[in-house]
Image (spheres, rainbow, N blue to C red):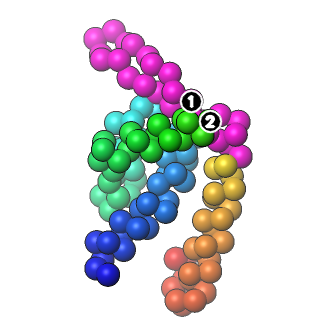
Amino acid sequence: MGTKSINTEWKKGSAELLLLSLIEAVPRHGYEIGKLIEQRSQGTLSFHAASLYPLLYRLEKRAWVQGKWVEKSGQRRRRYYHLTPQGRKVLAAQRKGWQSFVEAIGRVTGVENA
């Protein structure tokens, strides 16, 4: 398995956590979420619309996020997503699970602050 496929698998496993985290405090639209992931990861992670929007739709179907169409003067209509109370619970659980996972990987591999 090459590095690219390993990175793809890691991204798949963390995608929900990334998206939920970015809309925790502020409702955001899909394009903004994608750009923030790329910026905050310093280009290591990126999501194309073809994978980002279906994920947002799945999160909405699970009732973890709620989307709302917003029209602003001089801009095209955008769908802004925010966390639902159920989404906040899921995010808290995913953060806790991710923290435990990263700590365990660090202990096994000897990588500090993994």
Number of labelled discs? 2
Helix, strand or loop status at disc 1: strand
Q: Quadrant of the N terminus?
A: bottom left
Is residue 106 shown above or below 68? below
Q: Which mark is residue 88?
A: none
| Type of amino acid under label 1 | Gln
Q: Residues within 10 Å of mark 1 (few under 14, many from 20)?
A: some
Q: Quadrant of residue 110?
A: bottom right
The residue that mark 2 highlights is 63
Q: Residues within 10 Å of mark 2 (few under 14, many from 20)?
A: some
Task: Residue at 57%, 89% (x, y): give it.
Answer: 108
**What range of the chain is rendered magenta?**
64-89
Q: Which residue in the rendered view is the most extreme toward the top?
A: 73
**Above or below — where is 114 with respect to 21?**
below
Contact, mark 2 vs mark 1 (Cβ under 8 Å): yes
Identify the residue at image location x=34%, y=36%. 31
Q: Which residue is mark 1?
A: 66
Q: Position of residue 70 (x, y in %)?
A: 44, 17
Instruction: Residue 6: name its quadrant.
Output: bottom left
60 and 101: which is toward the camera: 60
- Nearer the observer: mark 2 or 1; the answer is 2
Residue drawn at the location 51% of the way across and 31% of the way down:
81
| Residue 99 drawn in magenta | no
The image shows residue 44 at horizontal and vertical percentages of 32, 62
Which amino acid lies under the numbered mark 2 shown in the image of this protein? Ala
* Separation of marks 2 and 1 at Cα, in angstroms: 7 Å
Secondary element under disc 2, as helix, strand or loop, is: loop
Q: Is residue 60 left or right of residue 5?
A: right
- Rendered view: 35 above or below 114: above
Asked if the magenta segment contains residue 83, the reply would be yes
- On the question of residue 109 being in view, the answer is yes
Determine whether, in the image, residue 97 is placed left or right of residue 21: right
